[in-house]
Amino acid sequence: LATNSVDSAELIDGAIDAAHLASGVGGKLLQVVQASFGGVQTMATSQTWTDITSLSAAITPSNSSNKVLAVYSINTGQAENQRGGLRIVRGSTAIGIANTQGSRTLASTVLVGIPSTLHTSNSSHSVLDSPSTTSATTYKCQMFMENTSDLHISRPRTYTDNVTYMTAVSTLTLYEIGA
């Protein structure tokens, strides 16, 4: 912080903004937006990218040179040895995905079912994006599943109404990073 740039009143009411930070230093965290999904969603096999309910958030960069760090943490359950994928989309453009490899589906993270029907696995991914705008920009998470199984978000494959079965939260967090 610059000398004498912050007083006690600003510390108390949270009025510290980018103007109070030292100039000429990039990488400042300017704002954080989070979407959280504590419910459950099942994707019937479709071999198409499908939005994950409630894992969508909009952020408005304060400068077109700023970057957005998009991070997800998603809990999934699917059948043993069944493949699926997760990705982040800005608007309608997938970001932070693999490079083209023949006709393979491009994802941010790949899911493989585990032997137990009672467990979930967690996937996390981050991508530093350059939206190059000062307009509200929407990011969302999507899921994909191969043709022989269903993909469950925030729950295991077997989901009985009993205290020993868990429902987990999944999140999408957006951080605006100053240029």
Image (cartoon, rainbow, N blue to C red):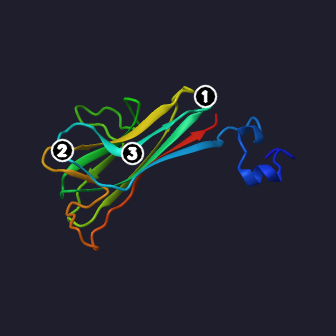
User: Does residue 131 appear to the left or right of 91 in the view shown?
Assistant: right
Residue at the spot of label 2 = 146
Report the mark closest to the observer, 2 or 3.
3
Quick check: marks 2 and 3 in contact, CB under 8 Å? no
Disc with the residue nearer the chain's start (1 vs 2): 1
Find the distance from the CA under tag 1 to the CA under tag 3: 25 Å
Find the distance from the CA under tag 1 to the CA under tag 2: 38 Å
Q: What type is the residue that disc 1 sits on?
A: Ser
Disc with the residue nearer the chain's start (1 vs 3): 3
Q: What type is the residue that disc 3 sits on?
A: Leu
> Which label is found at residue 95?
none
Q: What type is the residue that disc 2 sits on?
A: Glu
Whole-percent x, y for residue 110 in the image: 30, 48
Q: Residue at x 18, y 57 (%)?
A: 79
Q: Residues within 10 Å of mark 1 (few under 14, many from 20)?
A: some
Whole-percent x, y for residue 76 in the image: 29, 55
| Vertical comparison of 160 with 12: above or below | below
Residue at the spot of label 1 = 65
Q: Secondary structure at mark 3?
A: strand
Residue at the spot of label 3 = 55
Q: Residue at x 62, y 29 (%)?
A: 63
Whole-percent x, y for residue 70 in the image: 48, 42
